[in-house]
Image: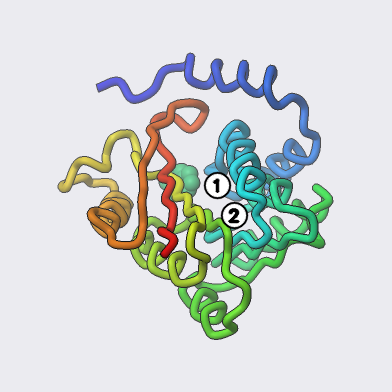
Amino acid sequence: MQDTDPRWSDVDDYIVEHLIGEDPAQDACLAANLAAGLPSIDVSIAQGRMLELLARSIRAQNILEIGTLGGFSAICLARGLAADGQLVTLELEPSYAEVARQNIQNAGQGDKVDILVGAAIGSLETLLGQGGKPFDLVFVDADKENYAAYLDYAIQLSRPGAMLIFDNVVRKGGVIDPDSDDPKVPGTRSLYEALKNHPNVDATAIQTVGSKKWDGFLMAIVREG
Ligand code: DHB
Ligand code: MG
């Protein structure tokens, strides 16, 4: 089956040219990531804008991101925060976190963003223990093996009505293959299993093509009441 088409990227370019435009801070972020040898697996520019608009649409005051990488999506989410809002983002790799810190600072978002370095589960336990303000939006874009665990933490750490978004939930269609040789597929499938008939969460997923080939975003809302 064909799982890529050069037009997908060309159309992403068209979308960016017409709807988003030049963005020196994002260009600088991607250049710095490349120079530092980070993997080029950030959300696309169009997806990043969508994250920003989703955050803005719910007037998010507190956002949690799991998986900072070089900070590209954190910059997008921080831009979507309400005035005096805060973003907490979790990153395993100290060297990635340092690149992200600089990128986020360069983009003028440093005051709004806290990066917690270390394994995400440990940071999530810390956040639970602190009992801080619940999150309005959680974006998960980290190790797929723990996606079902991240769902549990996201629910515990967020307010009723909160929005949860997971990246990479289609993986070139691999998600429907229980015998996939992509080691990340079982973790992604466990997220779907956890959400199947979930008592507290309504969800959907949308397949996407573009510069990130064939993949998808999953969106969920924690039920109120
Ligand atoms: C991978 C991870 C991502 O978050 C992504 O968006 C694309 C690919 C990966 O680990 O292969
Ligand atoms: Mg991703």
Q: Is 135 located above or below residue 131 in the figure?
A: above
- Residue lying at 51% horizontally and 66% vertically, measured from the top left: 158
- Residue lying at 79% horizontally and 40% vertically, measured from the top left: 25
Residue labelled with disc 2: 69
Find numbered disc 1 in the image and state the secondary structure of the residue it sits on.
loop
Q: Is mark 2 within 8 Å of ligand 1?
A: yes
| Circle count | 2
Q: Is residue 195 left or right of residue 4?
A: left
Q: Nearer the viewer, residue 9 or 154?
A: 154
Amino acid type, callout 1: Pro
Relative image position of residue 89 (x, y in whole percent):
62, 63
Q: Nearer the viewer, residue 34 or 216?
A: 216
Relative image position of residue 5 (x, y in whole percent):
41, 18
Q: Is 8 located above or below residue 141 in the figure?
A: above
Q: Nearer the viewer, residue 118 or 111?
A: 111
Q: Is residue 170 left or right of residue 196?
A: right
Q: How many residues crowd mark 2 within 10 Å: few (<14), some (14–19), many (20+)? A: many
Q: Are marks 2 and 1 in contact (CB under 8 Å)?
A: yes
Relative image position of residue 182 (x, y in whole percent):
28, 47
Distance from disc 2 to disc 1, alpha carbons, whole Å, reads 8 Å
Examine the image and state in which quarter residue 95 appears: bottom right
Q: Nearer the viewer, residue 37 or 146?
A: 146
The tag earlier along the polypeptide, 2 or 1, is: 1
Residue labelled with disc 1: 39
Relative image position of residue 71 (x, y in whole percent):
66, 52
Q: Is residue 187 left or right of residue 98?
A: left
Q: Which mark is residue 212?
A: none
Q: Is mark 1 within 8 Å of ligand 1?
A: yes
Q: Quadrant of the N terminus?
A: top left
Q: How many residues crowd mark 1 within 10 Å: few (<14), some (14–19), many (20+)? A: few
